[in-house]
Every structure is written in structure tokens, then in C-alpha cells.
Amino acid sequence: MRTKSLKKNKINVVTLGCSKNVYDSEVLMGQLRANNKEVVHEEEGNIVVINTCGFIANAKEESVNTILEYVQKKEDGIVDKVFVTGCLSERYKPDLQKEIPSVDQYFGTTELPGLLKALGADYKHELIGERLTTTPKNYAYLKIAEGCDRPCSFCAIPIMRGKHRSTPIDDLVKEAENLAANGVKELILIAQDLTYYGLDLYKKRNLAELLQNLVKVEGIEWIRLHYAFPTGFPMDVLDVMREEPKICNYIDIPLQHISDAILKSMRRGTTHAKTTKLLQDFRAAVPEMAIRTTLIVGYPGETEEDFQTLKQWVQDMRFERLGCFTYSHEENTHAYNLEDDVPEEVKQERANEIMEIQSQISWELNQAKIGKEFKVVIDRKEGNYFVGRTEFDSPDVDNEVLIDASEHYLKTGDFTKVKITEAADFDLYGEPL
């Protein structure tokens, strides 16, 4: 017979999905710690909270498998309780309750107070930006807005996250100051859509003003922009980027496709010509900028001609950083009404072709860096190398700078000048000066 463990409760928060989920888990953990709860991140605990992702098929599958794994541990008496929160739970709560009833409770993306209550904790409103960061100590995500008002046909985020809601500048500055006081040197600004920031609160796109306030925070050395939307991009942001050394010459702007027919069906509100002009304007305003984008191949109705247009454009634009995904047919999205007519193997072939082109472009751009010097932040030591990044690289998704640890001693979290000595497709090798 199974017995309840007598040990003091330890809450294990398991995070799946994107950086927005990482941030949400950190806020949850900060609240639990403020309630004097023992909380760990992806370690052993007798109470488990799984923060799920419900964005595309692979992510949903990973989330369901993780829930099943912990439910089995509950059956085996290894854990006492399992709670599920996040996007999958927001989107499919009734189905999940029916299919996996052994979970103690399911919570959506806006039900943090309820989740805390279930964990025997109170929601503390005064904890502005106080969170338990799970990233390496030198960088942290700063979520500047929640939700999205864009009508993109393939995307389920508005279903899971609701309408766009900006966080006030004063709150974000306070949060940045707290992070800096804890040793954070790099802020990675995230939102479903940075471009829209401030429209709801200040009646104008206000990302530039937010940046001007954040650069004043003592201790912060780099500020990086993630997930800007191409339509209505506030160009004054580029002036701040050019004038303020703390703003990394880097932007992550998911463009998804370039064929006019596909852009129209995707409801992106832009065209081939407008998108290309925007990128040319970016490069004219900030010539040093590294542009990261993500693309979707295999969208319903994508013809061979559409794909060739995309391929040629990737060749021509020579993005510094690029990721490519195969289309995922998501219920309750506008595109779900279309026939998912590109076979899975064709989607995969197209994604591979795009990444093959990008690999060559990245190799060529990296060769040009040999002999040059860059300011590099050291994120970690791995095997025989210290692993760092330049301002043109975001953690987990971009290039890294590898420094031989048998020859040089560096401290994680420190910035150091590095001369690049060798370059591969996606990694650079260097020596500290």
C-alpha cells in the first residue's frame, strides 16, 4: 500500500517550451520562495508543477509525455502531487482532465494565484519582478508584455495567452534593477510581439522609450531584443540601438515566409517588397546589426514556386542567424480551415534545404571574423572549453565562442576581449587578449 511521504514538501518546477515559459516559472518560484516554500527547478521534489507548452505538435507531445512520466511517478509513490500549468493546460484543459485524470489540478496561463493557493501559498502583489532566475547568473529574460493582438493564421498564441498587455516602464525598470543587484549583466527582452509594446498603455509604440530607461540601470551591460514583428516596426528603436552601446546590435524578427501568396494567407499584413525594404532600412540604420529570423516551410498551399522564392530570398538576404520550422496544423487557428496539403517528408526536405543554405552563409560570415576582436561574455565551462557569446549571439539558439580551458582561465559571467582564431559553420574559436 502506498504511503504519503513524511518529509517536508519540496516543490519541483519543470519548464517546457520557450523563454516566456522560463520567465513564468521563475515568477512562480519567486512567489513560492517568498511564501517560505522549498522550491527547486528540474530537480527531485515530492510535489511537481509542470509548466507546459502547447504551441506546435512536437511541443505538445513533449508536454504530454512529461505529464505522463510524472503521473507514473505519482502512481509509483515517488512523488505525492502533480500540478500542470502553462499553454497546453490553457488550451486543452477539459481534454487533459478527461484523458489524464491522475493530475491533481490543471491551471491556465493566467491562473497563478489559484496555482499558488493549491500549493499552500499566497499571491504576493508587492513582488514586482522578484523571481528566482534559472538561467546562468549573467543573463535573464525580461518579459515586457503578455499576449498578442496579431491575427497570424498559423498561430495559437492568442488562444493561449490572450490579448496584448504591456507591462509599465516603471515596473520593468524596477525589475531590471533587482536583476542587476543579483548579478545579471544582460537583459533579453521578450514578448509575443515587442513591436506592439506600449500601444495599450501609452497609446503609441513605446519600445524606444523603454530602452532609454533600461540603459540607465547600473550593472546592466547588454540589452537584447527578441521577437519583433515586422509590420509597424517602430524605427526610432534603431536610433537608440545605434546611439546606446548597451543595446546589442541584434534583433530577432520572425518573418515566417516571403512569397506574397503565402504571406497573405498567413495574414502577416506585409509583402515581399515591404519586408525586404524593412531589412534594408535596418542595415542602413545599424550596419553592424545581426538579424535573426525564423521561417516556416510547408504551410498549406506552399507550391514549389513559393518555396523557390523563399530559397532565393534567403540566399540574397544573407541573414546572420536563421532557424527554420516545418508547418504544424493547429486546431482553432485560421489556417486549420485550409488543407494541410504539403506532405511531411516534403516539409522536412524544404527545411533541410533552407538550413543547408544558411549553414553556408553562416560559415562565410564566420570566416570574415577570423583575426577580429570581440567583447565576449562567458556563459559556462563545458568539457575542455569556456563557452561565450558576442553581442551578435543569443543564448541557446545562436553561435558560440569556444576558448581552450586548458590554456586560459576565465570566470563565468565575466566579459572579456577575445581574438577569433578559427571559425566553423556555427561556432567560433578564440583566445582572450
Image (cartoon, helix red, strand yellow):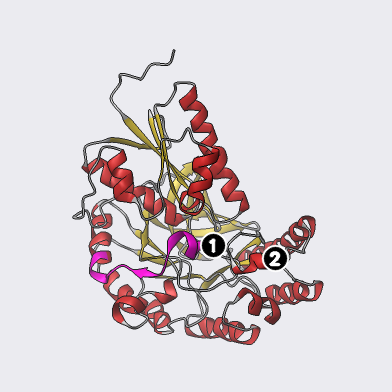
Q: Position of residue 16 (x, y in %)?
A: 49, 47
- Mark 1 vs mark 2, CA separation in Å: 17 Å
**Which residue, as the protein is rendered here, is positioned at the far top?**
1
User: Would residue 77 be found to the left or right of residue 293 on screen?
Assistant: left
What's under tag 2, amino acid-wise?
Answer: Val
- Residue 378 numbered tag: none
User: Is 295 or 317 nearer to us in this picture?
Assistant: 295
Q: Residue at x 49, y 35 (%)?
A: 101
Q: Splitting the image into 4 quarters, where does residue 295 fall? A: bottom right
Secondary element under disc 1, as helix, strand or loop, is loop
Q: Residue at x 26, y 36 (%)?
A: 37
Q: Position of residue 234 (x, y in %)?
A: 42, 82
Disc 1 + disc 2, Cβ < 8 Å = no
Q: Position of residue 314 (x, y in %)?
A: 68, 73
Looking at the image, tell me whether mark 1 or mark 2 is earlier in sequence order: 1
Q: Residues within 10 Å of mark 1 (few under 14, many from 20)?
A: many
In this view, 228 is above or below 384: below
Circle 1 sits on which residue? 156
- Residue 297 numbered tag: 2
Q: Quadrant of the N terminus?
A: top left
Q: Residues within 10 Å of mark 2 (few under 14, many from 20)?
A: many
Q: Quadrant of the C terminus?
A: bottom left
Find the magenta span and give its range.
156-171
Instruction: Look at the image and say whether residue 210 sits in the magenta stretch.
Output: no
What's under tag 1, amino acid-wise?
Answer: Ala
